[in-house]
Amino acid sequence: MPTPLHSALSAASAAAKPVWCVDDQNWKSVSEKLPSAARAFAEASGFKPDEGRHLILPDAKGSIAGCLFGLGKRGDKNVDLLLVGKLAGLLPEGDWKFSEAPTDARLATLAFALGSYRFAKYRENKKKKPRLVVPAGVDAKEITRIAEGMSLARDLVNTPANDLGPAELEAAIRLLAKKHGAKVSSIVGKDLLKKNFPLIYAVGQGSERAPRLVEFSWGKPAHPKLTLVGKGVCFDTGGLDIKPDAAMLLMKKDMGGAAATLALAYMIMDAKLKVRLRVIIPAVENSISGIAFRPGDIFKSRKGITVEIGNTDAEGRLVLADALALADEEKPELMIDFATLTGAARVALGPEIPPAFTHDDALWNALAKHSAKESDPLWRLPLWQPYMEMLGSKVADTNNVGGGHAGAITAALFLSKFVAQAKSWLHLDIFAWNPKERPGRPEGGEAHSVRALFALLTERYG
């Protein structure tokens, strides 16, 4: 029985209408091959193969003959590699196929699948979507796997906090784990203190929705140990250091690190990569109440490091600290954490480019290669040790915040205090949100860096 395709994709269909992807170099030859009525219409419309331009072409009877789609100048490095994803919102209902494919048919197909995503949980989208016939030579299973993993993350991030608190996030984790036969466990509420996760409990203690640590394992024990850790702050008020309203508006996405982690885990398990996967999600809500943790409080972390709270709005690094310490105890070959951690990362690199932190040059070089190939941008920032002094405290081993500079770096340095035994560690400070519609990237929740990492892990462990 064939693997079901993603809803935006189709198997070969005789009724599929053609899409001619044209650039400045092939436009003339393609136009000469068009049916006469379609060619005349394109000429009368003054169509040019400008980047992102499209034109629905009629046949001699007035029905649709196909679609022209402009790719701009061939070889132009400024052209979006996911540009073809724009077609998912432009084409009429029905099956379509590439009669003239872009240079990278695989990435174009993936872009189309990613661009077809819509979050329709609360408002029905009655518009029927087009479907793209998977081109010959493109692995439909891989495209479906990636698109469905990305959709999982997007759905989680887009769901508002009234419907996605720590318990609901745990339920989503359990559903994913069950689908792939993974073993799940959780530690909830005050049991976190009994099991020595004081920082996770401290952040979540002010909410009526109990904090928790959820984890699952999958794969053969003999395979290399890969551990994923995701920040699962289901809503962040900032705590007693309350955020202004504009900064709080999108805080349903503060569990975007957990969502990205689950998206990558889905892809890994579906592809059956040869790893022993461990996923760890601290799930909390950072709320304001009479028992919320306070600026100036001091807590002893799981690792034994005492932490002075300089700001309750720097809560993500606290829950990650205990989770990373747990992950590190197992000495994994590779440990990756995802977190919507700092506004400083957005100031430095904007919403589209997550900073990556690692001491492993070989890991970064491989990741950078796949980042470019997959059009999933990342940029390395340094774990600059002289800035460690910014985290100093006169009353504890460390403060949870640095000074007024290099916030993304000092946050990463704080996390590094809790990683000592993992062979390699990568920290990703993601935004988890597309502030505007772009090809293959609808406005709303996003799993930044996941596609690049999956390509890397497939190369290593496939």
Image (cartoon, rainbow, N blue to C red):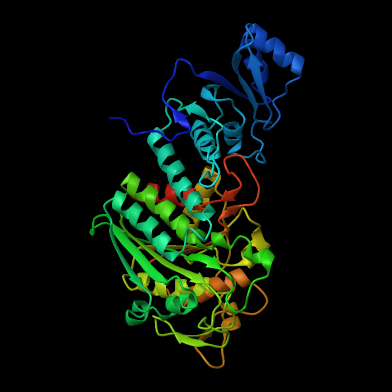
Question: Residue at 27% across / 30% down in the picture?
Answer: 1
Question: Residue 195 occupies which quadrant of the picture?
Answer: bottom left
User: Whole-percent x and y of residue 364?
Assistant: 49, 58
Question: Residue at 68% across / 77% down in the picture?
Answer: 404
Left or right of 28 in this view: 287 = left
Question: Residue at 68% across / 12% down in the picture?
Answer: 39
User: Whole-percent x and y of residue 243?
Assistant: 64, 71
User: Whole-percent x and y of residue 25?
Assistant: 66, 23
Position above or below: 208 against 79: below
> How many circles with numbers are drawn on the protein?
0
Residue at the farthest bottom position: 395
User: Whole-percent x and y of residue 427?
Assistant: 49, 64
Query: In this rendering, does residue 223 appear at all?
Result: yes
Question: Residue at 59% across / 27% down in the picture?
Answer: 91
Question: Residue 187 occupies which quadrant of the picture?
Answer: bottom left
Which of these two is toward me, 144 or 83? 144
Position above or below: 267 against 233: above
Left or right of 174 in this view: 427 = right
Position above or below: 122 against 17: below
